[in-house]
Amino acid sequence: MLQIILPIIFILFGIFLKKTTSPGFRNSKKLSNVFIILGISTLVAKMILIYIHSR
């Protein structure tokens, strides 16, 4: 279950970094893309592994 929750947290944190206007996070726009890509790729890989394991 943690393997599914953690990528979702990565995606949400990436979206938060992209949308925030706080001066402390203003320089984190490239990092937000990294978190979003990491979260999506990890989530897709976990779904593929769950599908393969269920067969």
Image (spheres, rainbow, N blue to C red):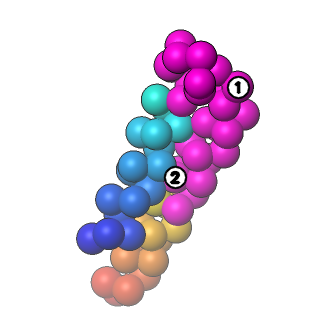
For label 2, the residue is: 39
Seen in the picture, residue 6 relative to 53 is either above or below; the reply is above
Q: Which residue is mark 1?
A: 27
x, y percent for residue 20: 50, 19
Three-letter amino acid code at disc 1?
A: Asn
Q: Nearer the viewer, residue 50 or 9?
A: 9
Check the image and name the residue furthest to the top. 21
**Three-letter code for the amino acid on which mark 2 is drawn:** Gly
Q: CA distance from mark 1 to mark 2?
A: 20 Å
- Which badge, 1 or 2, is on the more N-terminal residue? 1
- 36 left or right of 27? left
Q: Residue at x 45, y 69 (%)?
A: 46
- Front one among 8 and 30: 30
* Label 2 crowd bin: few (<14), some (14–19), many (20+), radius 10 Å: many
Question: Residue 21 location, x and y as percent?
Answer: 53, 13
Residue at point 52%, 51% (across, down): 40
Which residue is painted at 59% across and 54% down in the image? 38
Q: Secondary structure at mark 1?
A: loop
**Which stretch did the figure color magenta?**
17-42
Identify the residue shown where x is 59% and y is 16%: 23
What is the x, y in percent for residue 41? 57, 57
Could you say which disc has been placed on residue 13 in the image? none
